[in-house]
Amino acid sequence: MTEVTIRPATPADVDALAFVAAVTFPLACPPHTTREAAATFVIEHLGPDSFADYLSDPNRVLLVAEDDGTPIGYTMVVLGSPSDPDVAAAVAIRPTSELSKCYVVPGYHGQGVSRRLMEASLGAAREHGAVGMWLGVNEENSRAQRFYAKSGFERVGSKRFLVGENWEDDYVFERPLTEG
């Protein structure tokens, strides 16, 4: 691995972001999620057109991790109050932001890329005036839960997440965005 860089995503990144999303999203799904359901979600929410829309939204910040110019991970921060009533009830720190996506391709797991993306995402949320951050993580994704706990997040509630025709159960995690 050469030096991994973290930078804001640009419209030129939409195809690469969609590729990384197609590789990584199924890894976060619980074992009972069908390949078809995960693939449909990727097509409907994580394709190039979706990323183009996300990048044009002033309330979203997308960051990309690259190894020698090749995208290997990304995060998406959504600024503003949560629209989901379960999340709104669980999240106590305002103004808040959501860490909507945090993915790294498998060959780079355990190498500090996720930690660096997390640090950059926390910083981006702070720069936009948030004092808290929340996220949803599948109840069965213990690896991600451990990472989020190491990153200062605590479980504060739960919510539902639709993948295909199945509702999944997610934990809601939250953390303050204090420096240090």
Image: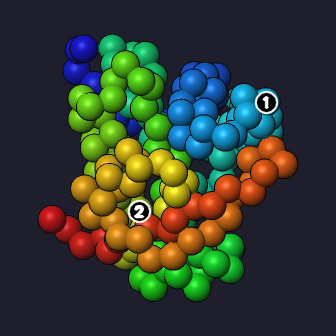
Q: Which residue is mark 1?
A: 36
Number of numbered discs visible in the structure rendering: 2
- In the displayed structure image, the side of residue 145 where residue 23 appears, left or right: right
**Residue 25 appears anywhere in the view:** no
- In the displayed structure image, the side of residue 171 where residue 175 appears, left or right: left
x and y, in percent, of residue 47 in the image: 72, 31
Q: Secondary structure at mark 2?
A: helix
- In the displayed structure image, the side of residue 29 where residue 147 appears, left or right: left
x and y, in percent, of residue 152 in the image: 27, 64
Q: Residue at x 42, y 82 (%)?
A: 93
Q: Which residue is mark 2?
A: 125
Residue kind at label 2, given as amino acid type: Ala
Q: Residue at x 44, y 67 (%)?
A: 173
Q: Which mark is residue 67?
A: none
How crowded pointer 1 is (Cα within 10 Å; few <14, some 14-19, many 20+) is rated as few
**Depth order, front residue of 5/20:** 20
Foreground mark, 1 or 2, reads 1
Q: Residue at x 33, y 14 (%)?
A: 68
Residue 45, quarter of picture: top right
Residue found at the far right of this picture: 165
x and y, in percent, of residue 21 in the image: 59, 31
Coloring scheme used:
rainbow
x and y, in percent, of residue 104 in the image: 42, 32
Q: CA distance from mark 1 to mark 2?
A: 34 Å
178 to 101, vertically: above or below: below
**Residue 124 appears anywhere in the view:** yes
Residue kind at label 1, given as amino acid type: Glu
**Depth order, front residue of 11/137:** 137
Quarter of the N terminus within the rendering: top left
Residue 80, quarter of picture: bottom right
